[in-house]
Image: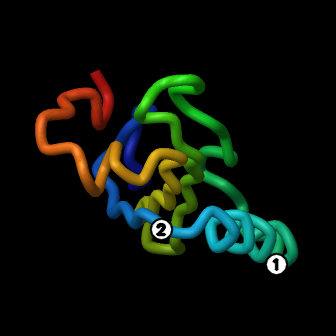
Amino acid sequence: MPPKGIYPRHFGLIFTAEGAWFELVGRCETHQIEFYQPPRLRFAGEITEHHTVFIQDPAYNILEFKYYLHYEAIFGATDNVDIGDR
């Protein structure tokens, strides 16, 4: 059965290049891959601002793809507790 809820168990991948994230979204649209959650910008104006999109494979696995606008938010800050849902 498909998982329920807004933020189910999933596998996530973080892009280090914004263009690569937009390319993935474009390829999904070109190949008519249905989004589990459509592309969106989260936490606008904050250090944790990022683009995110979720897709679901035929076995109901949820895949999340992100790009953080501030590299240090995820790859540099060791004391940032704002990553993830609250």
The residue that mark 2 highlights is 16
Image check: 33 left or right of 2? right
Nearer to me, 3 or 63: 63
Is residue 36 depicted above or below 30 in this figure?
above
Which residue appears at 52% of the width and 71% of the height? 57
Q: Of tags 2 and 1, which is closer to the observer?
A: 2
- Label 2 neighbourhood size at 10 Å, few (<14), some (14-19), many (20+)? some
Image quarter where the N terminus lies is: bottom left
Which quarter of the picture shows residue 47? Answer: top left
Asked if disc 2 and disc 1 are in contact, CB closer than 8 Å, the reply is: no
Image check: 45 left or right of 4? right
Q: Which mark is residue 31?
A: 1
Nearer to me, 42 or 59: 42
Q: At which x and y percent is residue 16?
A: 48, 68
Q: At which x and y percent is residue 27?
A: 77, 76
Which residue appears at 12% of the width and 35% of the height? 79
Three-letter code for the amino acid on which mark 2 is drawn: Thr
Q: At which x and y percent is residue 66?
A: 50, 55
Q: CA distance from mark 2 to mark 1?
A: 23 Å
Image check: 10 left or right of 79? right
| Mark before the other along the chain sequence, 2 or 1 | 2
Image check: 24 left or right of 83? right
SS label for mark 2? loop
Three-letter code for the amino acid on which mark 1 is drawn: His
Q: Which mark is residue 69?
A: none
Which residue appears at 53% of the width and 63% of the height? 56
Which quarter of the picture shows residue 48? Answer: top left
